[in-house]
């Protein structure tokens, strides 16, 4: 095996090595079954144990209380962009969208395709290039809306909600694809949380959703089965064949988080990574030019900045790659550099990158 | 590693060992990248090569001609049950459903949820317990229908179309989830073919679809993006993050088929497995009581039969398990025994099972 690189991809992203090593060791013979977990019927007891453990670990790590269902779905957050409004916007109701970046904009656009003008923009910072989050006083909530939708972390632009905005009694629905489990959160204020797995949870092709039962009760009953949350909830996400191997990797990743000390331990690491990286940016603010204008809105998952010229951006990406660090090129809408530091990125990995950044500014600054 | 069992599960099902060994060897370091393939951005060149190779292998093995798109989708065949009518039944059109088993019935029911009475039953053998396929003269095609839907192989009941029914000029849409690539076929008569991967192609959570471009052109343009075939086709199945690891395993499985001699070689093996298994059933017809009444309709993928008593059925399942053979219990709607013999099941595996069956009938017959 070659040397493992330091993986700063924005997603699919690095996974904890122990989760992958466990998969390697079991891939031909899962749990003494004489089969790979991906070769086992989803109705067989060997798979059912994995399914239940994955769900139980989501509940345990996020302290999901009674009255919430945990669902394992397919189609990425992008399918949730359609399913949320299809299920919850009906009977003359509307839905509010807080547009703070590329994916929340995507969620709004898909809601518009699904339910038309019933989807409303409650706030947007697009005119400012999404360099900050909307302030609470800028958000116009619609009375009696079915829900208010927010994206917890903006992967492309590098902003993140530390405190979620109040919603005047309307259920809050959050796309947490790029920061779920970065720290402990209080799940209770949310009507629904959903997250594509491919940043903090596992491989792509799997979505974890957490739905409050009283909110779920307001969902439609007349959609095709695969688009109906109530069907997935009533069948414990076994209405049809689930993505069994992806759920198995989710189990491995979450078991690793638990062994590491759970989400409190993740938060300590993530805050330290953010402190190191933004510390370097702020120490060389003329060279590493942060994209986000409000420091309070900075994401500890995705840090975005530009170097003084596009040529230096390109040199930075090329040199990091030579030094075994990949995935640092910024998203095409923003350019520059993006450092994605999901849970699998270790403090020492960020320390290595920051050392490189110090050296790079000495050479080119 | 423990001994690998003989896997007769109906799906998720056994996969070719070389495809899994390749995954094991590369799981921490794909192609010298220093990452698992599931840790690589779906926009990175290392993943793109896998994506393109998987699609190229589908095209090569099935001899998919120009004028057809190959799509890689999520949500299983169950989501296709909704997407097919949502995309193609509009503008006053209807769709015909040939109902020959559990999953074609499911496809019809979901179409009914999606487009109401515009989904029509063109034929059904439900009143006969799906023990045979509808005869061609029993199928009532609707003139000008958007498509006629058929399920190529009925996993639960054990029937399979050797020759697909004509459709009076209406595009034929086939769910081939449980027998795609069991042999070479002529793709040209089909408007669309779709297949969940978890029987003959790879892990669950991935769907392969083949769509004729002139049929695709009739699909709706106003659905949410993830539900729109035209979006997936125009983005080469990279509209959102695809299930990258599942596609990687698909690549491994298809590369193995190619190395084995392609689908012509698969057919030789599959016909031989069917000959062995049904030969044993017919030689002991009073003991192994085939569920399917028309021998011409028998599936070479899933053979279904009952022993003289439910106790003997249970004893058969228990003893096969003791002998390292799993997955032989019949589906709950049918009971008895089901022998699933997808491409990964080798002729020698069926020979082992048949030897067991000969011994079992000597002891209990």
Image (cartoon, coloured by chain):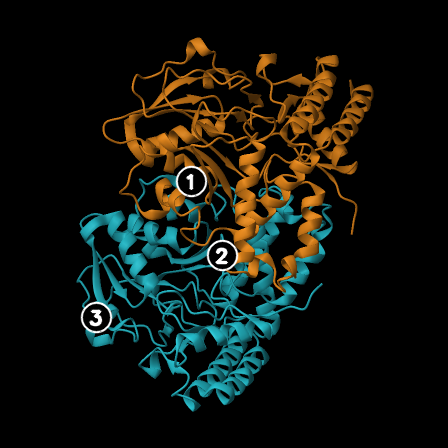
Chain colours: A orange, B cyan
Q: CA distance from mark 1 to mark 2?
A: 23 Å
Q: Give the residue at x 79% y 27%.
A: A356
* Labels 1 and 2 share a subunit: yes
Which element carries disc 2, helix, strand or loop?
loop
What is the chain identity of the residue bearing mark 2?
A: A
Residue A55 higher or lower than B345, as above or below: above
Quarter where residue B254 is shown: bottom right
Q: Relative to the observer, which residue lies in front, A63 or B242?
A: A63
- Displayed quadrant of residue A170: top left
**Is the residue marked by circle 3 packed among few (<14), some (14-19), or many (20+) residues within 10 Å?**
some
How packed mark 1 is, by other alpha carbons closer than 10 Å (few <14, some 14-19, many 20 or more), is: many
Determine if residue A319 is in view.
yes
* Label 1: chain letter: A
Q: Which mark is residue A79?
A: 1
Q: Pointer 3: what residue?
A: B139
Observer-side mark, 3 or 2, equals 2
Q: Mark 2 highlights which residue? A: A42
**Pointers 1 and 2 in contact (CB under 8 A)?**
no
Residue at 29 percent across and 30 percent down: it is A116
Question: Quarter-wise, where is residue A354 in the image?
Answer: top right
Say which element carries label 3. loop
Q: How many marks?
A: 3
Q: Are marks 3 and 2 on the same chain?
A: no
């Amino acid at each position: 095996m070659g040397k493992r690189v330091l993986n700063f991809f924005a997603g699919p992203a690095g996974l904890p090595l122990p989760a992958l090593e466990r998969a390697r060791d079991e891939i031909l013979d899962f749990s003494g079954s004489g089969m790979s977990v991906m070769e086992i019927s989803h109705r067989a007891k060997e798979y059912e144990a994995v399914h239940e453990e994955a769900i139980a670990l989501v509940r345990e790590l996020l302290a999901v209380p009674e009255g919430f269902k945990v669902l394992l779905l397919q189609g990425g957050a992008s399918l949730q962009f359609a399913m949320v409004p299809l299920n919850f916007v009906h009977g003359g109701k509307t839905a509010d969208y807080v547009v703070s970046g590329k994916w929340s904009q995507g969620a709004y656009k898909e809601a518009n395709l699904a339910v038309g003008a019933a989807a409303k923009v409650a706030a947007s910072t697009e005119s400012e290039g999404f360099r900050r989050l909307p302030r609470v006083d800028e958000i116009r909530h619609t009375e009696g809306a079915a829900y208010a939708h927010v994206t917890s972390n903006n992967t492309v632009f590098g902003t993140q909600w530390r405190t979620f905005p109040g919603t005047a009694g309307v259920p809050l629905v959050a796309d947490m694809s790029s920061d779920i489990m970065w720290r402990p959160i209080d799940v209770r204020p949310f009507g629904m949380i959903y997250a594509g797995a491919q940043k903090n949870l596992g491989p792509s092709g799997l979505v974890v959703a957490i739905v409050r039962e009283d909110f779920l009760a307001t969902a439609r009953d007349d959609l095709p089965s695969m688009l109906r949350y109530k069907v997935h909830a009533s069948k414990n996400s076994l209405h049809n064949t689930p993505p069994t191997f992806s759920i198995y990797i989710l189990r491995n990743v979450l078991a690793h988080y638990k062994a590491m000390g759970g989400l409190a331990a993740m938060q300590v690491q993530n805050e330290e990574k953010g402190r190191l990286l933004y510390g370097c940016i702020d120490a060389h603010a003329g060279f590493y030019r942060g994209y986000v204008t409000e420091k309070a809105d900075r994401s500890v998952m995705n840090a975005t900045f530009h170097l003084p010229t596009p040529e230096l951006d390109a040199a930075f990406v090329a040199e990091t790659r030579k030094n075994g660090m990949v995935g640092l090129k910024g998203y095409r809408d923003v350019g520059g550099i993006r450092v994605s530091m999901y849970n699998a990125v270790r403090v020492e990995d960020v320390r290595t990158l920051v050392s490189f950044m110090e050296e790079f500014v000495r050479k080119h600054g």
